[in-house]
Image (spheres, rainbow, N blue to C red):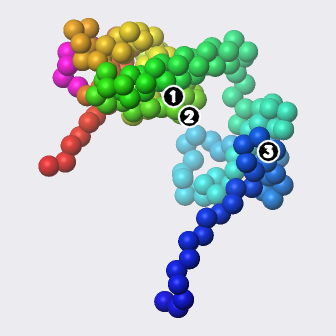
């Protein structure tokens, strides 16, 4: 090694309150990337792993074959569920920080993942969620109080105190518990 090692801390292109400049990015037009059939082999579409699949245009309108064509009522329901998930998540994270529950894994920023998945499934489908999928339970009408009781491991705990906090389940709605494997 020649010379002294140097620590390089990159400067952000914009600070909070500044308007960011994304002109250096080469973005395809919204809807320009083709949507393959659902049964295509992954080896036949390596470009999708490298390209940006842009669905929304600069006016926030969905364009092209990736547009799911959701009606306004479904979009509003999804937004309400995402906000409810974030509110629940914030409350539970504060409870964990206050020492009222032993463990909590926040889903901040991943609300749309759970709600989007939930919209794609039908009511009778079996779901096997992972961590940070509180939105799936909320979307399938698992009561918030029931979910809180599970995290608190109290007498109303749906798992009877046999699971770690956030390992929810809802048998009536075909939502299975998270698998919490431990190595020995």
Q: Which residues are magenta?
A: 158-163
One can see residue 120 in this view: no
Q: Hey, which residue is sitting farthest left in the picture?
A: 184
Camera-side residue of 141 and 46:
141
| Residue 18 numbered tag | 3
**In the shown orientation, is residue 141 left or right of residue 20?**
left
In the image, residue 167 sits, relative to residue 74, either above or below, namely below
| Residue 114 numbered tag | 1
**In the shown orientation, is residue 144 left or right of residue 31?**
left
Looking at the image, which residue is at 31% across and 13% down? 149
**In the shown orientation, is residue 37 left or right of residue 114?**
right
160 magenta-colored: yes
CB contact under 8 Å: marks 1 and 3: no
- Report, in whole angstroms, how far the alpha carbon at label 2 lies from the one at label 1: 10 Å
- Of labels 2 and 1, the one closer to you: 2
Q: What residue sits right under mark 2 in the picture? A: 109
Name the secondary structure under disc 1.
helix
- Of labels 2 and 3, the one closer to you: 3
**In the shown orientation, is residue 111 left or right of residue 17?**
left
Looking at the image, which residue is at 43% across and 16% down? 124
In the image, residue 150 sits, relative to residue 30, either above or below, namely above
One can see residue 57 in this view: yes
Camera-side residue of 151 and 112:
151
Camera-side residue of 132 and 14:
14
């Amino acid at each position: 090694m020649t010379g002294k090692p140097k620590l390089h801390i990159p400067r952000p292109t914009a600070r909070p309150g500044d308007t960011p400049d994304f002109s250096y990015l080469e973005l395809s037009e919204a809807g320009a990337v083709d949507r393959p059939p659902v049964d295509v082999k992954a080896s036949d579409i390596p470009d999708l792993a490298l390209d940006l699949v842009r669905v929304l245009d600069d006016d926030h309108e969905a364009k092209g074959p990736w547009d799911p064509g959701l009606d306004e009522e479904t979009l509003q329901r999804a937004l309400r569920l995402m906000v409810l998930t974030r509110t629940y998540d914030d409350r539970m994270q504060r409870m964990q920080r206050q020492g009222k529950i032993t463990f909590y894994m926040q889903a901040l920023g991943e609300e749309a993942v759970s709600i989007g998945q939930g919209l794609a499934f039908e009511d009778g489908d079996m779901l096997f969620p992972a961590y940070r999928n509180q939105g799936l339970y909320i979307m399938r009408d698992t009561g918030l109080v029931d979910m809180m009781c599970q995290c608190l491991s109290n007498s109303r705990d749906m798992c009877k105190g046999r699971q770690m906090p956030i390992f929810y389940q809802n048998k009536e709605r075909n939502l299975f518990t998270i698998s919490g494997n431990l190595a020995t």
